[in-house]
Amino acid sequence: MIDNSIARFGNWVAHQLPPGLLTDLLVEGIIGGAGAILIFLPQILILIFFMTLLEDFGYMARVAIMMDKAMTRVGLHGRSVLPLMSGYACAIPGIMATRTIESWKERLVTILVLPLMSCSARLPIYALMIGAFIPNQTVFGYFGLQGLTMVLMYFLGTVTALILSLVFSSWIKTEKKSSFIMELPPYRIPLMRSVFRQVYTRGKLFVTDAGKIIMAISIVLWFLASFPKVDSGNGQEQTIHSSYAAKIGKTIEPMIAPLGFDWKIGLGLVTSFAAREVMVSTLATIYNVENVKDEVVSLSDAMKRDKDPLTGQNIFTPLVALSLMVFYVYAAQCMATFAIVKRETNSWKWPVFMVVYMTGLAYFGSLIVYQGGLMMGFS
């Protein structure tokens, strides 16, 4: 509903303003790009709401105590639970919350695996791909396939984080033994005014912080996707396949083709290094520029209709969507996170290591999913 409302608003603006570059920039770049992220704000606010409730109930501290023994077995600390759970909302406050962990080794391991927890910035990508390409059907008689797919993405990141924490813990050596002492807050009924204030504050920060990046990137992408103009014989006619954006995407396309990705997805992978959610606005900008009817269309509809000009086959399929989601489960796609890691570790060594291992994990994870799916007969 929100997706269609934004599309209708873009069409209304396009009809109210005279044709020209400024109108194209406003409709295709700003509304089509930055507006796309607002579609997923309700899901993000719901996630923040329940995380805030758990914190205010006093339950999170008890989880840390209950999980201390289990966390120790994988090389983490009982206090690692709180940062890891915060990572489901955003990795940045989670990384900052590791300051409560006294052991440098356990703190460092927590920092290294924390970005694998599926944060709210991944949610727009999951929601877009699942809503558009995963069938809305029931499996095992009770469970919705779309819901199971969403849970699988979160489960995949969490399990991988725990496995890697064990690996990193055995690799990073330290002589100091850690202990766990924590004061339990009393159970209390949360003040809903306080809860909603925190939800509003965090939601506002998400929109404003992401919005600044998305706005700037959307404008740049609009330019890259709209120029240069090509002469089709009937005057100047823009085609995205000869644009600067296409050239960038097609440069890396051979490297990502084994994952099932085309140049448009490749361009999204590049731009979303600034922030994961930029992937959605990148696709929205590209497809709005590509649309020859001068109308802002629903992003999911545009992706479903997109076909390879050479083979005539759909660019996006359920298998490609699954491959892309797995890539984003693992991918190192957040500059702000790495800046925080550098600040917290006081070294470029660990953020660089994080980028390398997460990018490699994302590539090979996506490769296994896509190529394995093809061998099993999926498309």
Image (cartoon, rainbow, N blue to C red):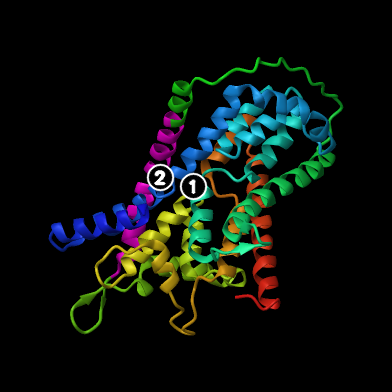
Instruction: Specify the quadrant that holds the C terminus.
Output: bottom right
- Residue 247 is tagged as none
Residue 54, horizontal then vertical, whole percent: 60, 28
Q: As displayed, is residue 92 above or below residue 129?
A: above
Mark 2: amino acid: Ile
Taking depth in this image into account, of 68 and 232 the one nearest to the observer is 68
The first of marks 1 and 2 along the sequence is 2
Which portion, as a residue range, is magenta?
A: 200-228
What residue sits right under mark 1 in the picture? 275
Residue 89, horizontal then vertical, whole percent: 55, 38
Residue 139, horizontal then vertical, whole percent: 65, 63
Q: Quadrant of residue 147?
A: bottom right
SS assignment at label 2 = helix
Q: Quadrant of residue 324?
A: bottom right
SS assignment at label 1 = loop
Taking depth in this image into account, of 32 and 12 the one nearest to the observer is 12
What residue sits right under mark 2 in the picture? 213
User: Callout 1: 10 Å neighbours few (<14), some, many (20+)?
Assistant: many
Question: Can residue 330 be seen?
Answer: no
210 within the magenta span = yes
Q: Which residue occupies 73% across, 37% down?
A: 109
